Amino acid sequence: MSEANVWKADGAGWRARIGVITPDDDGVPESELWTMAPDGVSIHAARAPLGELPKYAEPPGPDNAIGLLARLPLNRDR
């Protein structure tokens, strides 16, 4: 097998990739998820600005955060 065909870790989870939407001013949820994630599971967070929560809860606020998260290749085949 040539060296070009050897799989190399790229930092993304090989077992699973979890996408979360987290407040932009709070790094704790993302940090806690990384702490709990088993080997081979990576956490991918979209930071959502939550300056005015009631206003943000209406579209396009959540849609924008989900759109950023959806751009990640979370279900990519190896």
Image (cartoon, rainbow, N blue to C red):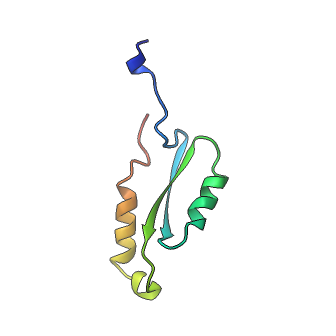
Identified at 38% across, 20% down, the residue is 4
Identified at 40% across, 13% down, the residue is 2
In front: 58, or 49? 49
- Specify whether 52 is left or right of 39: left
Which corner quadrant holds the C terminus?
A: top left
View extreme (top): residue: 1
x and y, in percent, of residue 75 in the image: 43, 46
From this view, report whether residue 67 is shown above or below residue 7.
below
x and y, in percent, of residue 13 in the image: 52, 43
Which corner quadrant holds the N terminus?
A: top left
From this view, report whether residue 12 is shown above or below residue 28.
above
Identified at 66% across, 54% down, the residue is 36
x and y, in percent, of residue 19 in the image: 48, 57
- Specify whether 68 is left or right of 16: left
Instruction: Give the image quarter of residue 77.
Output: top left
In front: 26, or 70? 26
